[in-house]
Amino acid sequence: MNKHISLYLDVWRFGAALVVFLSHVASQKISNGLFWQTKHYDQTAVMIFFVMSGFVISYISSTKETELKDYSIARVSRLYSVVVPALLITFIADSIGYSINPEFYTEGPWPFETDSYLLTYFLSFLMIQNVWDLGLNPGINQPFWSLTFEWIYYIAFAAVFYFKSNWKYAWLALILVLAGPTIVALFPIWLLGYYLYRVMSNNARQTNSLLSVLISFSAVVAMVLVGPEIRKIEFSSSLIARKEVYGDYFDAIMFCIHLYFAPSILHYGGYILERYASAIRKVAACTFALYLFHRPLIQLIAAITPTDLEDSFYRLSLLLIPLLIVFTVGYWSEKQKSNLKNILNDLCTKFVGKVK
């Protein structure tokens, strides 16, 4: 993948996670609406994640992970290196916060499961807590909802891409049936990212015209200005629980248009990304941790801090404490990805050896 595109995706990845983080800080009950503007774009950020996920999988499956074993080990190590610490942080933070201020958890506008506590963690560990709209996310950590979608998309893609038998379509159908209609409804958004990379890689000689720059920027402007209005149009279906499907697809299409023409922007401004490449890579490495760590942390801070919601020190703590944990524990978690990958590779080698 072109270095400038790779760095540009890193900027978007972390930026999208930051929007989700700030949109949760913006809760009236937590900060009295600090950064309220970001609340319009938290779901947009997740659609950006889905598109980029498909885009990156398209790249690595055609270059680095051409075998099912390599793909599977990479995906499992990528997810679980952060999912396990995220579940531990959620359990610890929720336990402390709930013991001190239970009403803040049970009477807030956010779902907090108390009857099936262990079940939510078990299903979330397996990343199937939202199949068929179960909604059994761990504790207060609602951002976990999208993990089931990603996990299913990874598995569905593997079934079609890596299996050569005609049975692969039967496996795909079974996977999608087990996932449920809501997850299936957003699968084309992930596939948009997958095919976008294919189109861009087959059309490497794009013209770097100012018109392309204008189109690329216009797509982002449309996503920012028009996207929230599209999201107000409710999607109604007895099978699909998600109500913002029209907005989801609008944002995904606009982001794809932006990315398709982004090389023209990078032709003129890519040197800026290259100048700060090291810093961008380090910050972007903590994107997944920021997405999965922040929610229980800001809830805990708010639950144990009896103060004015507009107090400057309190608001600063809502921002800095989660970020500090993300860039320490999260950075450590990312480092474990390679260790986990090595362990899984060794296990696969030993298993294959025993079978032979």
Image (cartoon, helix red, strand yellow):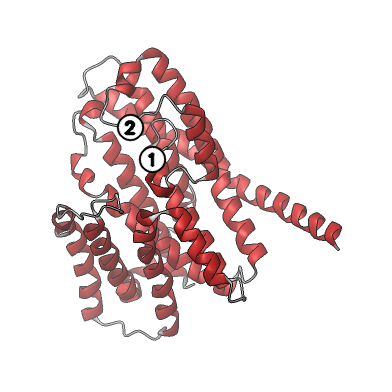
Residue 332, how many percent across, how many down?
Answer: 57, 40
Residue 185, how many percent across, how many down?
Answer: 34, 60
The image shows residue 87, relative to residue 288, as above or below, that is above
Residue 330, how many percent across, how many down?
Answer: 51, 40
Which one is earlier in the sequence, the residue at label 1 or at label 2? 2
Secondary element at tag 1: loop
Q: Quadrant of residue 10?
A: bottom left
Please give the label number shown on residue 122. none
On the image, numbered disc 1 is attached to which residue? 135
Mark 1 and mark 2 residues within 8 Å of each other at the beta carbon:
yes
Quick check: 356 left or right of 266? right
Residue 80, how many percent across, how many down?
Answer: 57, 45
The image shows residue 76, relative to residue 293, as above or below, that is below
Question: Distance of mark 1 from mark 2, alpha carbons?
Answer: 9 Å
Amino acid residing under circle 1 = Gly
The answer to whether one can see residue 57 in this image is yes
The answer to whether one can see residue 6 in this image is no
Secondary element at tag 2: loop
* Of residues 45 and 176, the one drawn nearer to the viewer in this rendering: 176
Image point 48% across, 39% down: which residue? 327
On the image, numbered disc 2 is attached to which residue? 111
Amino acid residing under circle 2 = Pro
Image point 44% across, 65% down: which residue? 54
Quadrant that contains the C terminus: bottom right
Q: Residues within 10 Å of mark 1 (few under 14, many from 20)?
A: some
